[in-house]
Image (tube, rainbow, N blue to C red):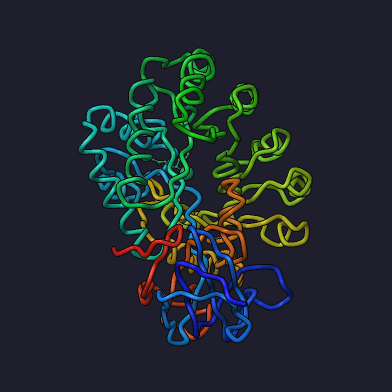
Amino acid sequence: MTHPCDLLITNVKIATMQDNGVPYGLIESGAVAVHNGKIVYVGESTKCRYKTNNIIDGSEYLLTPGLIDCHTHLVYGGDRAGEFEQRLQGVSYADIAKAGGGIKSTVKATREAGFDTLFNAAAKRATCLLKEGVTTVEIKSGYGLDLDTELKMLEVANGVGEYLGINVSTTYLGAHALPPEYQNNPDGYIDFVCSTVMPKVAEGQYATCVDVFCESIGFTPEQSQRVFEAAGKLGLKVKAHVEQLSDLKGAVLASQYNALSVDHVEFMNPSDVPSLTKSGTVAVLLPGAFYYLNETQKPPIDAFREHNVPMAVATDLNPGSSPMASLLTAMNMASVFFGLTPEEALAGATVNGAKALGLVTKGVIATGMDADMCLWDVSHPCELAYAINQHRPEQIWIGGKHVVV
Ligand code: DI6
Ligand code: FE
């Protein structure tokens, strides 16, 4: 007995990224059937009982889940190439921030930019990601800091998703930097974030998550905690930039609020890692920022492995510390700098990226999951983290629809 389906991909090697005891969850000669945007069959070609006229011969290429970039700041005005030059002359990222540059200079440019300017620039960056096989991208606000500009950024982010047909997950990052209106009054600004902006974000469904920059040049753990408390009351999920430049114990704090992810974590103490296991929090590694800032302190990878903390890999695409629109390069850097295996790097950009966003129907090729997939002309999945700028997907599907980039 056969069943009808919308799409059948045959004669293909499949890195399912399912935990089935085989590296990459690999199926050597498989088939995938898709119906109504969902995967309805994955397994041996010979056992597939689905039928359609829409058959793609996978030519023995490799099928992977669509890639997931779970941490970006890709909506912003202006650029910071001048700061890049300053940093090359020895001025530190933190000193530039303290002198009013850094995030604050992008806030000025983003407030001044019109919707269309922001939209076009963001769509261009998102297209770079999509061309490399990114089918889901998280986009944060945080360069507006006032109500109107934060909502404008989130509207741009959601609009880019609709325009390109890619999945966008939005995060309100009001507690990113202190805006000029609240100079010397960080607690007053946190009041504004929690009482004025967050309720609007939740009510208008502008974003599903809330993020904070818990750092000496950002916000204190106490201020971060107030944001987490408010998020819980409004049904917004928690993510956090922690331990990027110093160890303020932000990761432990975020885990107490069941954070979906803690991001950067270079300065996290290995002894604090078990707190993440308890809350099921993902450690998001951002090797692009590590690279651009010439960082030497590496995240506690061995402790993450030992305590079964899922590791995701993302670009952190932003104008300051990581102007890098390439998730495959981030995967390569996570292997070279942090010692991830190519399999961990691919899991970081698929199954664990989905976990970091709380997306339960994405990140693996399995029955019942969304049909977001990429077909690559590679003979083994380890090639994706190994090579730089050599691979683009031959085909991309999002929700079962073939995407032409
Ligand atoms: N950490 C980051 O990596 C981005 N934000 C943050 O808190 C960088 C933001 C920037 O430099 O513009
Ligand atoms: Fe970031």
Q: Nearer the viewer, residue 144 or 5?
A: 5
Q: Nearer the viewer, residue 62 or 309?
A: 62
Locate residue 402: give its quadrant.
Answer: bottom left
Task: In the rendered view, tell whether residue 243 sits above or below residue 28.
Answer: above
Residue sitting at x 30%, y 47%: 163
Pinpoint residue 15: horizontal percent, then vertical percent.
57, 74
The image quadrant where one finds the N terminus is bottom right
In the picture, measured across the screen, residue 128 lies left or right of residue 227, that is left
The image quadrant where one finds the C terminus is bottom left
Task: In the rendered view, tell whether residue 282 sits above or below residue 158.
Answer: below
Task: In the rendered view, tell whether residue 300 sits above or below residue 83.
Answer: below
Q: Nearer the viewer, residue 282 or 134?
A: 134
Count of numbered labels shown in the rendering:
0
Task: In the rendered view, tell whether residue 164 sits above or below residue 44.
Answer: above
In the picture, measured across the screen, residue 99 lies left or right of residue 30, that is left
Q: Nearer the viewer, residue 155 or 162?
A: 162
Pinpoint residue 37: horizontal percent, then vertical percent.
48, 58
Residue sitting at x 46%, y 53%: 136
In the picture, measured across the screen, residue 51 lies left or right of residue 182, that is right
Pinpoint residue 330: horizontal percent, then vertical percent.
46, 62
Residue sitting at x 52%, y 19%: 190
